[in-house]
Amino acid sequence: MNTYAKSGIDLKLYNELIKKVKPIIEKTKGEEVISEVGSFSALFDFSSLSKKYDHPVLVSSTDGVGTKLLIAQEVNKHDTIGIDLVAMCVNDLLAQGATPLFFLDYFATGVLNKNVLLSVIQGIAEGCKESKIALVGGETAEMPGMYGNNHYDLAGFVVGVVDRKQILPNCSIMKAGDCVVGLESNGIHSNGFSLVRHIFKSLGINYNDISPWNNKSWGEILLKPTKIYVDSLLPIMPKVKGIAHITGGGLIDNIPRILSGNLFVDININSWKWPDIFLWLKEEGKIEKREMLKTFNCGIGIVLIVDPDNMKDVESHFQKRGEKIEIIGKLDEACQPPLDRVVFKMFPGFLNYSLAGKALEKKIWNLEIVNIRSFAKDKHSTVDDVPYGGGAGMVMRPDVIGNAVDNVLSAHKNTRFIYMTPSGTKFNQRIAKELTEIPHVTILCGRFEGVDQRVIDVYTPYELSIGDYILSGGEPAAMVVLDACIRLLPGVVNNFDSVAEESFSYSGGILEYPQYTRPEQWSRYKVPEVLLSGNHRKISDWRREQSYVRTKERRPELLNGDDK
């Protein structure tokens, strides 16, 4: 005689497990849960909560933890995967401005393993307690033949509530200049594990091996649970315009989900430190940086959009909690809805650690970065194409660049339009000084094989070169020009007289004289006696002579006026 047990379903074990699970679930319940464990469905009394909201809106979300499960199953560690499940669901709810209320889970396996199930449920309950929500029920499905030995799958479902007026994102009040704030992640969280597993398999690394930067096994590092942000975010919801949960798709795909209109984000790629696991994956997995940012959270688990006027309160809130946040960028606005809403700047590192950056903070000068991709017309934001007549490399399209340039010219009609190119006039100190006297300058940074010649023909830019060599793009060259010009502005260099005595500024544009400081004798060399004499006329004559000698030896063309 055939029985259900003979088909692989052990109802006796199932009923025993329900009894063991019941007290775990009960610890998460509040007075709003009025159903018992084992009921056909869960009952949640919403009446008292609804009084707290003018117009309550229920918010729901469902998710899983992907192939992170396979690592948990391989190392036989199941106590944190339930936390991941809750985190993935409740963090998505927070992105709508909602407060989570209750949670349900789905556990499916080929053959029930009592210890595994209890461990997973305990993790789910722990995640619910951390999120201050009730685990009101779930489904445990034993399906022989559907899953391999010791394999199981998980899914979660959460319901929350938000007042209609408080629903996020609030795109109507977002504006250019709003701060983009990053909250640190707890590691990889629960996305990108198919790529992680592929890398580990290709490198022949066992999850029980010890990582190179601490004494923890790879399994421990990879299974670190997804951070739950409920306690962190609920108190500051009124100060926030938008929340992005950085899951599959990374920063590149998730931030655009909370933007609309012509807004995009400028991200300073140097504004936060990537955790070791991401640096290791990038290096050992040979993953390009953009692919990393499109796959993993790279150390940023949540992104907030905050008005600059509210940043002090937001920073104070997280500081009191001992949590680290970083301003990783700002909102900007294009002339039309941009196809690429996340831009990773090349300039921020230069601006963070230079005199130019300090001068920017003091508003001695101002910088606006125009994302050329925002003016592309196709779904891939294409800005270049193959050259007519054949040849290697790509050429930047005139229609795309033309749209970008026209946008700038419409706002700044008297701008000096510059194009950085190896074939341009050689940049020097004289040109730098001339540019500082111009109110507005626009620098076009070419890439690949440069720009279509018709851009040059139509806009006739001032073509500049910083040297006889090729760079991968015009951005580094633009930084050189900017720095050379900005340091000539009053208020940038503390001792402005020192600028006039530098090479190329001193005595008709020749090289500067040699400089000496303490100690008077170092190694076997002494400071020239004339500099110790106190005779300013002799010192001036000596310096002029040394400048001439040095220039004649090293850059004679400067004496002949050939450096044009």
Image: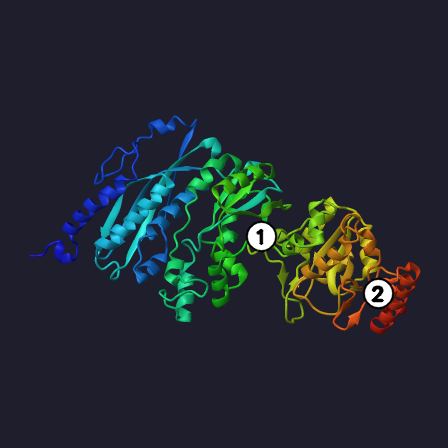
- Front residue of 385 and 247: 247
Q: Is residue 9 visible?
A: yes
Q: How far apart are marks 1 and 2 (CA)?
A: 39 Å
Residue 459 in view: no
Q: Which is in the foreground here, disc 1 or disc 2? A: 2
Residue 178 position by quadrant: top right
Q: What element carries label 1?
A: loop
Residue name at image x 21 percent, y 38 percent: 39
Seen at 22% across and 42% down, the residue is 22
Q: Which residue lies furthest to the left in this view?
A: 1
Asked whether, in this view, residue 41 is left or right of residue 2, the answer is right
Point out the image quarter for the C terminus: bottom right
Q: How crowded is mark 1: few (under 14 residues within 10 Å), some or many (20 or more)?
A: some
Q: Which mark is residue 513?
A: 2
Q: Quadrant of residue 103?
A: top left
Q: Which of 258 and 13 is in front in this view?
A: 13
Q: Where does the image place residue 96, in percent across and percent down from the top left?
A: 45, 39
Q: What residue type is labelled 1?
A: Ser
Image coordinates of residue 27 in percent, x first then y, are: 28, 40
Q: Quadrant of residue 362?
A: top right
Residue name at image x 48 percent, y 31 percent: 165
Residue pointed to by mark 1: 271
Contact check, label 1 and label 2, Cβ < 8 Å: no
The quarter of the rendered structure image containing the N terminus is bottom left
Disc 2 residue type (three-letter): Tyr
Q: Is mark 2 on a helix, strand or loop?
A: loop
Query: At 38% from the left edge and 41% from the top edge, which residue is drawn?
Result: 131
Q: Which of marks 1 and 2 is nearer the N terminus?
A: 1
**Residue in the foreground of this view, choosing between 446 and 496:** 496
